[in-house]
Structure formats: C-alpha cells, structure tokens
Amino acid sequence: MTEPSKVIHVRNVGHEISENDLLQLFQPFGVITKLVMLRAKNQALLQMQDVPSAINALQLYTNIQPTIRGRNVYVQFSSHQELTTMDQNTQGRGDEPNRILLVTIHHMLYPITVEVLHQVFSPHGFVEKIVTFQKSAGFQALIQYQSRQCAVQARTSLQGRNIYDGCCQLDIQFSNLDELQVNYNNDRSRDFTNPNLPSEQKGRSSQPAYGDVVGYPPQMPNGAAIAAAFGGGLPPGISGTNDRCTVLASNLNPDRIDEDKLFNLFSLYGNIVRIKLLRNKPDHALVQMGDGFQAELAVHFLKGAMLFGKRLEVNFSKHPNITQGADTHEYMNSNLNRFNRNAAKNYRYCCSPTKMIHLSTLPQDITEEEIGNLVEEHGTIVNTKLFEMNGKKQALVLFETEEEATEALVCKHATSLAGSIVRISFSQLQSIRENQ
C-alpha cells in the first residue's frame, strides 16, 4: 500500500463516467480541491482537502466495492502527495482562476437552495448553472459563471462571508471542471441558460402544479418543491392539499384597516390576486390568494394575530374566488407580490407574527436613527440593528410586542424612503446580537 496521500488514484474510469459522478463518490468525505480526468488511460486523480478525508474514503472503499453507473472503479492512494499544475496538464486548474466555483457551506442552520445561491452569486455576474450536493460532510455547490472574471470577483467578494447572520458561511475555491452537466431544473440543480429542462419531480406529478388556478407564472413551485423549501417537510399543521384560494378575515378594526394594509400582511404567505372589504360587514374582508397552499399558510399563521387592538380571525371562505368589481382592489399584476421570484426562499420565511421585523431594499446611506423614525410611531422599539448583506443595506427592529411589530409591517411595508421601496417581513430571530 502506498503511504497515505490526499491524492486518490481511481482506475477503470469508463468514458461514460463524468467528473460529477466522481465528485459524488468522494464528496461525503470532505472538500475535493482538484480533479484530473486521465481519459486516455481510463483513470482519474482526485485531491481531497486533507489526508484524513482521503484515508476515510479509502477505508470505506476498501471494504465496499465502489461502482459508478454499474461499473466497478478501483481506488488507491496516489504516489503524488499533491497535484501540481503540471500533472493537471490542460485538464485542471486547481487554484488557478476558473469560471466554475466550488462552494462549501459551513454552519448551515437554514436550508440553502439553488434560489438562495443564485441570489447570493448573481450580483457578481451571469450565473449559467448551479449544482448542489447535500452529503454527510456538509453542503457543497458548483456554480458556473459565464465568464472567469465574474467568478474571480465573486470569490474575492464572498469568500468567508455568511449568507445569513451568524451562519451559513461560504468557503469558495475554484473548481477545475470545464462545464457543469445539469439534467434537471429543480431546487438542487438549475441550468439558467435552458429553462425547459424537466424538474424530475417524482411522486407528486399526478397533481397539477400549484398556481395553475389563476394562471400565475408556471414557476410557482408544486408541493414537493415547497416541502423542500421548508427543509424536507411542510410546517406542522399544514396539509398542503387545500385547494380553496379565498380566505375571510374578520374582527378587523374598520377605522384603521384598508386593502393595502391587508395586502402587506397577507402577501407574506403568498401572491395576492384581489381583496374586497365587505360593505355590509365593515370588520370583514375577503382575500384571494394565488393558490390553495398559500391560503392555507395565511389561515395557519395569521389566525389569532393581534392587529390594531383586535384579535384577527382568519378562515377559508365559502367563495372559491372574488368576483372583480368596483369594490375590489386588484393585486394580481402587482410587482409588490413577493412570491413571483425566489418563491422557495419566501416560503421558508413564513411564520406567525413575531416581535422582530426585517427591513430590506433600504437606501445605501440610511442610518439607524432614520429606521427608528420610520417605525417608532407603531410601538416601543427595544433594539435596532443596521447591517449589510451582499452590499445591500438591511435592518432588524425588535419591538416590545408582536402587535406593535405587525402594525409597523402593515403600515410601512412598500412605503418609499429616499427613493427606495422598503420591504418588511417578520424575522424568526429571537434577539439582536451585537456581533452579527
């Protein structure tokens, strides 16, 4: 047996075996820093981040015969301790800049999807493809940019940064792959240059995709995608099978409520089609959501919430939809609907009202004082924190009660501040830590 090395030599690598196949075989043991396909010899050289990772891989694959696509592959330590650029020839790049990044995410407290990664990496250039792997050693993704320059810029800007406060830290290296192979567009892989790929949805395909009801864009996720957004299962108490789109909100404060305020609250749980305040019952309103799943989220999370001194009642309406008329407010084409883009991310943020609100799309030169001025009329502010995420200003404001936070959200979401339209949602963080 050759002495242990972080470089693994793989034999019997048939032409049908791709770089991705090999990555998947060794991904569970740690970060793979380099991969060289020796196509002429049906072999490959693969460098792990450290020797223990390579030892773990070989210990397992000495006892269990690894196979890829039905073919046995044979693994041993390489005589090389390190793959140099010479060994890699024209195949690999190692630490040399490449348009494909290998991203490892540490301290992953929240599920990370293709949508989240796209949001983080797309400000630096056109992202063509993303492939993610969830393995025992952690979560990794390969991100392919249109140009090498964009990948270099993204790595420089994002290396070591957290996607969310205090967690989901990015560890970014250059991959040495030439092209990512993407077969499916779903929450684990995506080819942004080919939107027509199948989603490989199994098991739920007999059901029509959510969102067909009112002709929303077809990218509205179906049940499986929504479950994935929630980390693999739906929240407790959510069936995912409701098909009633319209909800009845009652016990409203008729002196303080209007359609836009209801929109600001209900749009946290889905796209809003239209809203109607009932003339004969001024404390009642009908809200038509984008689909039955979104309506179910609204009923589940808003029932019993306090707003303007009243405890909200939210139930499914007997009306399948609201007929458009002079007394209805239309929101179907509103660009303030939150679920047209990054739906999976928005589903994940669904929760009952909390004491903490999260403000985004703020002016770059905003101060904590200005944020306080914006929302202080709605209650007692316990704490405020202004921070930057991907170069954009965001803020957290903690109120004394859920009702005060709800009022601030309902009254101030989508208002204009120094030319920026402020977006407000509830934060599930319990407290504001100073070191965030």
Image (tube, rainbow, N blue to C red):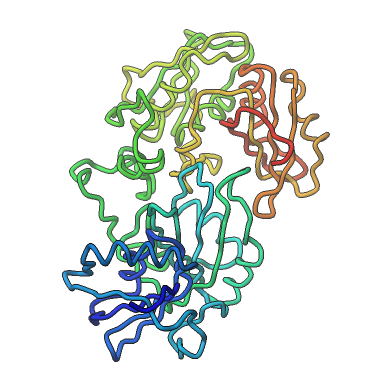
Across the whole image, how many numbered discs are drawn on residues? 0
Name the residue nearer the viewer: 371 or 335. 371
* Left or right: 311 in relation to 43: right
Q: Where is residue 229 shown, x and y percent of the image?
A: 41, 42
* Left or right: 127 in relation to 388: left
Q: Quadrant of residue 16?
A: bottom left
Quarter of the picture holding the C terminus: top right
Name the residue nearer the viewer: 260 or 220. 220
Quarter of the picture holding the N terminus: bottom left
Identify the residue shown where x is 51% and y is 85%: 84
Identify the residue shown where x is 72% and y is 40%: 435
Against 403, is 326 above or below? below
Q: Quadrant of residue 211?
A: top left
Identify the residue shown where x is 31% and y is 17%: 318
Against 176, is 241 above or below? above
Name the residue nearer the viewer: 284 or 122. 122
Identify the residue shown where x is 48% and y is 82%: 83
Q: Where is residue 290 shown, x and y percent of the image?
A: 39, 35
Q: Where is residue 98 shown, x and y percent of the image?
A: 53, 77
* Left or right: 323 in relation to 429: left
Q: Where is residue 33 shown, x and y percent of the image?
A: 48, 71
* Left or right: 93 in relation to 261: left
Q: Quadrant of residue 260?
A: top right
Name the residue nearer the viewer: 254 or 372. 372
